[in-house]
Every structure is written in structure tokens, then in C-alpha cells.
Image (spheres, rainbow, N blue to C red):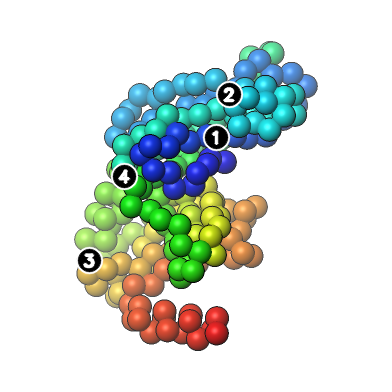
């Protein structure tokens, strides 16, 4: 995972992961990342030495840092581990189209922690995936698509963050897709549901009444 979940442009971000080798030995662990519309990957080694946000030396948790990035940047990253025999795996795993469904975070200088605020949800996508979803939203509602984009889902509530990588974000509804603001559906992986849910709907229709109902339910 990464920390802080929603960094500012003055903050580097640390990434850590517990790595287990089936062969019992690891030759190396790397973090690959790129920012915005960059196509080239930056590669930095990850360490299990107790000095790189990885807890204790030799405990199987590897860590490293991503340098601070400009405000509103979207950073995409994945991990690669290789054993002594040259076998390697990546997380997130490869898709049929390549290393595309990766973990994401966004830099936001305007963000301020407010434990008393209503829950805030964010879905972070690559710029090109966001444009693809916007293009789908411009199609006639009866000629639209349920294609889902890879995203990182984040929820801030009572001063704490929940982060889910690799969710699927798509448009939802039928005739409501003709509206100026689109409804969204977030699909979670079966092994990492969000609060016991495999999917949630983010509705943009009748929002005031939904907020009022939420407040009344929490009262």
C-alpha cells in the first residue's frame, strides 16, 4: 500500500508490501511508477532493511519512496519481484493487454483532513481511462457501454482512509445516462470487498435527498 493516501505536492509517498517467495529466496524487488501521461516507467529498488518504511529488517516487508509530484498529478505504480532462478511476478498482475491495471494515487494540495465531514469517496483513474469513460458518457444512452475502467477507490470517514486498488469503475443506469452528470458503479474484487459489498452505486440524481436520507440514518 502507499502512504499518505492523498499526498500534497511537498510530500514523498512511501510504498510497502509483504513479499513471499515460493522458492524461499528473492533476488530483488522493484517498484515501477510513472506519472500522468508519461509512457516511460521509473524503476526504484525496494528494501527489507528496516530503513525504507518497511518496519523491521528481514521481516519480509519491502518498502521504498516515490519522490514528491506536482499538484493534481496521478501516479501509477506496480511491484515486480524476482527469485534466484529468474522467475518473476508483478503486482498487480498482468492483464491480457499488458501491465495496465495498476495501483494509482493522486496528489491534491487542496485536501484538508476534517474528521467531522461527511464521508468522501474518490475514484482515481489514469488520464486516458478517464477520457475513455467521458467518451462513453457522450454516447446515446441506448448505444452506451458497460466497459469498466481500472481505478483506485478511496473513502475518507471520521479521519481515516480506506484504499482499494484494482476496482472497476463504469457508468450505471440506462436512460439516466442521458443526463449531464453521470451515475457510476464501482465493482470490488471478490477477495477485497468494501465493507462486505462487492459493488456500490454512486448516484448523481436527486443528490440532496440522498444526503438528507444518509444524515437521518446516521442520527
Ranked by sequence position, the earlier of labels 1 and 2 is 1
Front one among 116 and 205: 116
Label 3: few (<14), some (14–19) or many (≥20) C-alpha neighbours in 10 Å: few
Marks 1 and 3, Cα distance to the nearest angstrom? Answer: 41 Å
Quarter of the image for the N terminus: give it.
Answer: top right
Residue at 53% across / 34% down in the picture? 14
Q: Which numbered circle lies on residue 46?
A: 2
User: Which circle, 1 or 3, is nearer the viewer?
Assistant: 1
Mark 3 and mark 4: span between their CA atoms?
A: 31 Å
Q: Look at the picture and state if 8 lies above or below 53.
A: below
Tell me, yes or no, whether the two marked residues, 1 and 4, touch with CB atoms within 8 Å: no
Distance in Å between CA atoms under marks 2 and 3: 47 Å
Q: Secondary structure at mark 2?
A: loop
Q: First in sequence, mark 3 or 4: give its number.
A: 4
Which comes sooner in the sequence, label 2 or label 4? Answer: 2
Dots 1, 2 in contact, CB < 8 A: yes
* Label located before the other in sequence (1 or 4): 1
Residue 135 picture location, percent across and down: 24, 54
Q: Is residue 107 visible?
A: yes
Q: Nearer the viewer, residue 128 or 114?
A: 114
Is disc 2 surrounded by few (<14), some (14 to 19) or many (20+) residues within 10 Å? many
**Location of mark 4 (residue):** 72
Q: Which mark is residue 140?
A: 3
Residue shown at 41%/80% (left/top)?
210
Which numbered circle lies on residue 15? 1
Measure the C-alpha gap from mark 2 to mark 4: 25 Å
Q: Is residue 197 above or below residue 82?
A: below
Q: Residues within 10 Å of mark 1 (few under 14, many from 20)?
A: many
Whether label 2 touches label 3, CB < 8 Å = no
Q: Position of residue 65 (x, y in %)?
A: 50, 29
Does the CB distance between marks 1 and 3 fall below 8 Å? no
- Secondary structure of the residue carrying tag 4 is loop
Amino acid at each position: 500500500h502507499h502512504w499518505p493516501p492523498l499526498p500534497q505536492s511537498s510530500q514523498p509517498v512511501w510504498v510497502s508490501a509483504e513479499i513471499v517467495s515460493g522458492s524461499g529466496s528473492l533476488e530483488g524487488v522493484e517498484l515501477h511508477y510513472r506519472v500522468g501521461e508519461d509512457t516511460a516507467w521509473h524503476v526504484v529498488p525496494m528494501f527489507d532493511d528496516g530503513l525504507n518504511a518497511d518496519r523491521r529488517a528481514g521481516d519480509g516487508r519491502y518498502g521504498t519512496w516515490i519522490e514528491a509530484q506536482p499538484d493534481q498529478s496521478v501516479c501509477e505504480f506496480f511491484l515486480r519481484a524476482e527469485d534466484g532462478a529468474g522467475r518473476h511476478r508483478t503486482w498487480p498482475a498482468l492483464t491480457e493487454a499488458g501491465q495496465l491495471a495498476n495501483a494509482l494515487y493522486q496528489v491534491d494540495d487542496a485536501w484538508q483532513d476534517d474528521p467531522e465531514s461527511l464521508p468522501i469517496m474518490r475514484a482515481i483513474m489514469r488520464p486516458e481511462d478517464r477520457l475513455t469513460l467521458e467518451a462513453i458518457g457522450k454516447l446515446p444512452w441506448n448505444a452506451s457501454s458497460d466497459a469498466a475502467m481500472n481505478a483506485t477507490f478511496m473513502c475518507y470517514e471520521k479521519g481515516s482512509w480506506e484504499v482499494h486498488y484494482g476496482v472497476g469503475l463504469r457508468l450505471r443506469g440506462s436512460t439516466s445516462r442521458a443526463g449531464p452528470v453521470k451515475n457510476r458503479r464501482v465493482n470490488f474484487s471478490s477477495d477485497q470487498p468494501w465493507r462486505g459489498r462487492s459493488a456500490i452505486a454512486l448516484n448523481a440524481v436527486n443528490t440532496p435527498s440522498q444526503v438528507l436520507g444518509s444524515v437521518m440514518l446516521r442520527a
